[in-house]
Amino acid sequence: MATILEVFNDDVWRLVLDWLHTDDIIRSERVSRAWQDVIYRYLEGCGMSIEIGTRPKLWYGVNHKLSHTYRILRLEEDKPEIHRNLLQKWGPCVKKADCVNSTMEALVKRCPNVKDITVCMTSLN
């Protein structure tokens, strides 16, 4: 008997996952290795933007999407250890990121597809 993971192709998953908040997508990869593969392919295809601190919701229009090409993952504050752990797992999916000096090295090492980096010399909160 086939599971939903085997029935839906990547195009259908993209349509379904586009409706979810980025936090929920990241959490759903914990279900199983098969779910992790689906989520990874989705995020790799659309790209992920990591932001530190809060940004005005009106700037982007929608709270959980930057555009049709990037998913936003907001971190409440700059904690280099959490940032490095996140980049270790999701680095190839990251195409845009905020960082401070303490996270720049991890970003450069683990994010081969990054296209846009915002570097701040002070706290981003």
Image: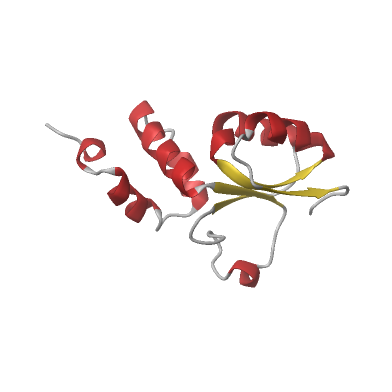
Which residue is drawn at the image coordinates 60% and 45% (left, top)? 95
> Most extreme residue toward the left, as rendered?
1
Image coordinates of residue 59 in percent, x first then y, are 65, 69
Q: Which quadrant holds residue 39?
A: top left
Quarter holding the N terminus is: top left
Depth check: 77 or 11 in front?
11
59 with respect to 44 (left or right): right
Which residue is drawn at the image coordinates 61% and 28% (left, top)? 88
Image coordinates of residue 79 in percent, x first then y, are 75, 38
Which residue is drawn at the image coordinates 53% and 59% (left, top)? 64
> Most extreme residue toward the right, as rendered?
121
The image's colour scheme reads: secondary structure
Image coordinates of residue 122 in percent, x first then y, are 88, 49
**In this view, 54 is above or below 9:** below
Q: Which quadrant holds residue 103?
A: top right
Which residue is drawn at the image coordinates 59% and 39% (left, top)? 113
